[in-house]
Amino acid sequence: MPVGDTRLAVALAQAVPNANVIDIDAITGEIRRIGDQAARVIQVVFWFAFLSGCLVFVAAVAATRRERITELGVLRTLGASSAQLRLAQLVEFGAIGAIAGGIAALAAAGIGVLFAQRVLDLPPSWSGSTLAIGAVGGMLAAMLAG
């Protein structure tokens, strides 16, 4: 039936009193609304976990600041330029972020595949770009935070 046209449903209910008329549009709309709410909840949890991870990283960098200054002083004494020291820090933070982002992306993709298989009965789908995006995102976030 066309959306909003209830004449056929009313006529069918009057002609056959034992027939059940079900509005599928209303049911699918409710399912879509619940799915949207679940997606919003998952996004909030994701951003909370992401921000928590950023705070932990910043705290770890702050905790090792004294050692890092000592190392940079030794390297400066041995003749390293400011550009070399900056590059060394960017490489260090980039490697840490890439490893952390890759592990996070791998874990998230694994949980997503398990959820799709066990809860939604969907075939597993894996994308290598998820791992790459997670690693690059983690690397950039760590380089900016560092």
Image: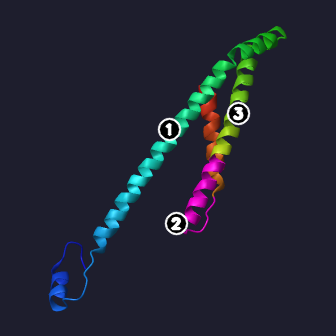
- Find residue 140 and report its image quarter: top right
Direction bottom: furthest residue: 15
Between discs 3 and 1, the one toward the N terminus: 1
**Residue 97: x, y in percent?**
66, 35
Disc 3 to disc 2, C-alpha distance:
35 Å
- Above or below for 40 versus 31: above
**Residue 74: x, y in percent?**
81, 11
The residue indicated by pointer 1 is 48
Please say if the residues under marks 3 and 2 sit with CB atoms less than 8 Å apart: no
User: Which mark lies nearer to you, 3 or 2?
Assistant: 2
Three-letter code for the amino acid on which mark 3 is drawn: Ile
Q: Does any portion of residue 144 appear in the rendered image?
A: no
For the point 63% across and 47% down, which residue is it?
105
Three-letter code for the amino acid on which mark 2 is drawn: Leu
Is 108 a magenta residue? yes
Q: Which residues are magenta?
A: 105-126
Please say if the residues under marks 1 and 2 sit with CB atoms less than 8 Å apart: no
Three-letter code for the amino acid on which mark 1 is drawn: Phe
For the point 25% across and 81% down, which residue is it?
21
Please say if the residues under marks 3 and 1 sit with CB atoms less than 8 Å apart: no
The residue indicated by pointer 3 is 96
For the point 19% across and 87% down, which residue is it?
12
The residue indicated by pointer 2 is 120
